[in-house]
Image (cartoon, rainbow, N blue to C red):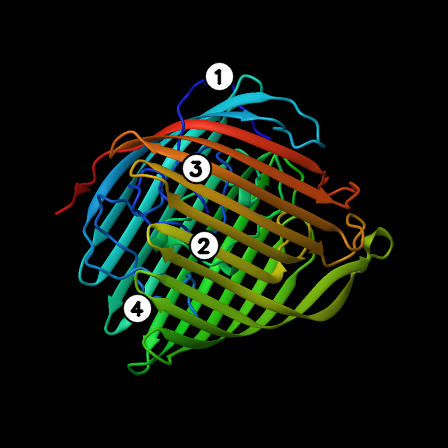
Amino acid sequence: MRTLKPTIGIALLAVALRVTAGHAQTQPAGSSALAVQPVVTPLYAGNSGATNGDSGTRAANDRALAGAQDLSPESSDARRSYWQPFFNLTSVLDTNPLGVGNTVSLTPWGSFYGGADLHLSSHTSDLSVNYLGGGALSQYRSGDGPIQELAVGERLSWRHVLISLFDQFGYLPEAVSEFYVPMGADLSANREASLQPAFLPNQSIVSTLGQVLTNSFVGELDVPLNQRSSLTLVESYSVLRFFKSNLLDLNNTTVQAGFNHHVTRNNTLALLYRLTALRFSNVYQPMDGHVVQLAFGRQVTGRMSFQVAGGPELAFFRSVAGQTSSGAAPPIIVRSKQLYWTLDSSMTYDIGRTVLKLGYGHSLTDGAGFLTGAITDQGSAAIDTPFSRRLTAEFIGGYARNQGLMQTTQQPTNEIYRDWFAGVTINHALSRRASIFLSYQVQRQATNFVCAGIACGSEFTRQLISVGLTGRLQARPIE
């Protein structure tokens, strides 16, 4: 785990921990902006990627069921162009910062960051840019940890064709799982730039050592065939790089094509095909997965969105079986294939001023830096509810199971990692522009892995208590 040096001492301010990919902690109690993906630890706490009450914007609900984004229950109201700066200060008490066994070693540390949201809207384009930068600090750790995040999303209308472009970049001081991404340092929750897990690297195995760089670029083309049907083409390229840790770097290319048909105003069916090509930079173990899914989606504006997609996946593997003496002849390449099943589902439900989010997925993934491919199950739940006009609470929980696919000299057969988390955050609004929070989270990882060369997994339990202050200045319109 990357640490830091100056103490941000005891009662440093507190920020409402954001739940699942993107709920703004500075929102009024009536806000229902909760995100799709399960993201938690208040490690660097805060909020940056959610819709803000000042903006007057709402995420569009014209997303394709076979596209790169989850459906949204929100309406595509008229949008305004604006920019809005924000900041965050957080102090954390960490019971196990190195993720070693079940030992308890209370370690205080803190973080800070600042950034801005930018939205530009016109008749043919909607552009969303979110940036934050900062660092994590502690005198008890080995060094400073930079925090850099950038999320960009743009939707272009051109001659009845819709073109969408997305990019998510992050450089974080810990190679943490997506469940434990620093709250405020996660811009992927930004609704206009959020992406489905199939187009992002798997980060559901916890590593507290080293730093991580990740970037995902996605392009989507939606072509209407008639008033009810459309074609969707998606291509993405992702990289995942680990520093100061012996984990597996990843290059991931994904291509997807789908047919969407609106059965009724609120219900949609889709048939899609997806090719995922996984390549590891420091191990020869290429994998290609061919997925066919039938999908159903339901949207009720202002109330709920639900989608589920399932079908088979045929995976092709290549590995090196051996090499002749002195390397005079090329190594022997062993080819194999295997049939799996896949399921992707998510739901967002607004119950008055309370927002419930659920998600579950089962698929072949890249193995999160620990495994050369894995069968991954991930589930998450989040609920955001107001207690009063100024007091709100967020409850989160989730689970991930990664089982290795291939047996190598570095990996034993049936290698399994199990991760789960739970947490609660109480947020108190000091004003329209600032709020304080108090949060508690617990993480647990268990594995049957005996260290053999690539990355040493370990079982550990980790608890974090955080307090902090977050704020957003008034949104400034752009003419």
Question: Is 215 positioned to the left or the right of 30 in the image?
Answer: right
Q: In the picture shown, does residue 25 fall above or below 282? A: above
- State which tag comes first along the sequence, 1 or 3: 1
Residue 74 percent location from the top left of the image: 31, 59
Whether label 1 touches label 3, CB < 8 Å = no
Q: In the picture shown, does residue 124 fall above or below 108? A: below
Provide the residue designation for mark 3: 17
Mark 3 is on which residue type? Leu
Provide the residue designation for mark 4: 162
Report whether residue 71 is seen. Answer: no
Within-10-Å neighbours for mark 3: few <14, some 14–19, many 20+? many
The circle on residue 357 is: 2
Q: Residue at x 76, y 42 (%)?
A: 453
Element under label 4?
strand
Residue 259 percent location from the top left of the image: 42, 78
Mark 2 is on which residue type? Lys
Q: Which of these two is toward me, 342 or 241?
A: 342
Report whether residue 435 is seen. Answer: yes
Provide the residue designation for mark 1: 7
Element under label 3?
loop
Name the quadrant of the N terminus.
top right
- State which tag comes first along the sequence, 3 or 2: 3
Whether label 3 touches label 2, CB < 8 Å = no
Q: Residue furthest front?
A: 388
- State which tag comes first along the sequence, 2 or 1: 1
Q: Which of these two is toward me, 416 or 216?
A: 416
